[in-house]
Image (cartoon, coloured by chain):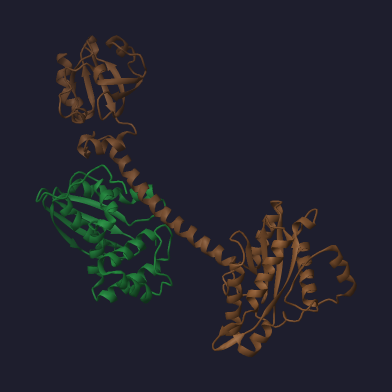
Amino acid sequence: MQQSAAMIPVFDQLCPMHVLLDTTGHVVHAGPTLQKLRPDAPLASLRFLELFELQRPRAVRSMEELLASSGMKLHLRFRDAPPTDLKGVLMPLPGGEGAIVNLSFGISILDAVGDYKLTSADFAATDLTIEMLYLVEAKSAAMEASRMLNQKLQGAKIAAEEQAYTDTLTGLKNRRAMDHVLGRLIAGERPFALMHIDLDFFKAVNDTLGHAAGDHVLQHVARIMVEETRAADTVARVGGDEFVILFDGLTGRGVLDRVARRIIGQLEKPIPFDGQRCKISASCGTALSSDYDTPEAERMMADADLALYASKRRGRACHTFWSRDLAEEAQATLPPACRGDAAHVPPPRQ
Amino acid sequence: MHGLINRAIQRFVTDTYGEEAWQRVARAAELGFTDFEAMLIYEAVMTQRVLDAVCDDLEKPCAEVLEDLGTYLVSHPNVEALRRLLRFGGVDFTEFLHSLNDLPDRARLAVSDLDLPELELREHAHDRFSLTVSAPQDGFGHVMMGVLRTLADDYGALVYLEHKGGPRGREVIDITLIEAGFAEGRHFDLAARVG
């Protein structure tokens, strides 16, 4: 052992986490950094296998078995707290004098620097640990900056999408959003109703009281439609004074007729604006997904439109369901493009 | 110029002189936006316009503003990460000085498109050094003056620094180490604080 004793200062410098073991497997000397991990009690004279639990290779219980694992990568763990994981390699000393085990932290270094208050001086000059810690921090800082940017971009994307689907004057969904929801309802094979609503006498408000009054009325109308429908329904402004409501999961004629009448009733209450009273009404037409074998968006829009025309012809301020009879009747009597109000109204702002 | 550098200037102005001051600078520099993103790249002229606007706004010579920026970068708690990364360079000030040669490469390890000025340290005697700062834009030398002065304090070393100027794109700083262990210095803990 004398020869190895003379080597201790060399080992301490080159591998500050080494342990010298005698022939019985007891610690003769521990390198300064390893000793720093257990500052309260000297490691010397403790039995190596009582100090560490060997996790790989397993079932090593004696110095002989330990020596048999020489040159292999050892996975060990302190038996007492904190149970830091270590990696190591054991080599027998020349002349059967015992063995030297060199240890290092693997990835456990990230916890170990905190647990043991390690400093640069605790590592061999050639050890890359400090560089690794540097990289971990630098990468974390860079990732954090990237994460912040991603979060910001994500927020901007959501806001842009929101805007792209919103009618900015009324806050309702726009035509694009309505098409999107309609497509989804059809693809999901859900029962639904498509109600087309066209304001009556809106042009008169716009022409006599000005665009500000018109805008005010549209906002008021939007509010009523949202109030009279459920959160799951989609209310969209699809034209100047045209609206579409998609009723998700609802095809009951009685309920839909009541909703339409309630909306018309609310819209007919005069809307005060700037000391004036704006009077409008509305005509509604509804197509039900249950009336088709395979509902199609364009077809349903056209049919709801047809039902809306029928309401207009019946003297406005009423609600009509599309039906095959209605379609045949319309074929016979209705001249194309006979709409009264929709001509000179402002298009929806995107 | 890398967003990290622009962002650093923005944070320096904001943390030192307030959000109002930064808003004035962003307007005067005609950025068209108010916040630099750390992970985007901006045109170099933008950085120059910002620096000019900062100097105008503070009514201070550019060299002084840049040195203050250097000081800020390694001392303000909001940018503590940077001080830590630099302190990884060495256990004492001399070792830190030598680690500056590797700094641009180290920075690229973390952010591959970040081009820092080239730094070249020469040791003339054990207590006499010179640092050459080479970059397409002048001014980094003054930032390094602030960084070196503050980190010397951080290490507890007493140093004398002199900015010698130099040909365009190359600035030389003379460094005299008067006493390595002049004061206690600030503690450096290898374990990173999470957060």
* Viewer-proximal residue among A334 and B173: A334
Q: Tell me if A90 is positioned left or right of A252 in this view.
A: left
* Viewer-proximal residue among A53 and B109: A53
Quick check: can you spot residue A149?
A: yes
Task: Spot the residue most to the right.
Answer: A332
Q: Residue at x 37, y 67 (%)?
A: B47
Q: Position of residue A176 (x, y in %)?
A: 65, 65
Q: Position of residue A5 (x, y in %)?
A: 15, 18
Q: Is residue A201 above or below residue A130?
A: below
Q: Quadrant of residue B138?
A: bottom left
Chain identity for the colour brown used in the image: A
Q: Tell me if A250 is positioned left or right of B150 in this view.
A: right
Q: Is residue A63 above or below residue A238?
A: above
Q: Residue at x 31, y 46 (%)?
A: B194
Q: Quadrant of residue A42?
A: top left
Chain identity for the colour green used in the image: B
* Viewer-proximal residue among A103 and A220: A220
Q: Residue at x 16, y 20 (%)?
A: A44
Q: Which quarter shows the N terminus of chain A? A: top left
Q: Position of residue A248 (x, y in %)?
A: 66, 57
Q: Is residue B63 above or below residue B89?
A: below
Q: Quadrant of residue A298?
A: bottom right
Q: Tell me if A153 is positioned left or right of A4 in this view.
A: right
Q: Which quarter shows the C terminus of chain A? A: bottom right
Q: Position of residue A311 (x, y in %)?
A: 77, 73
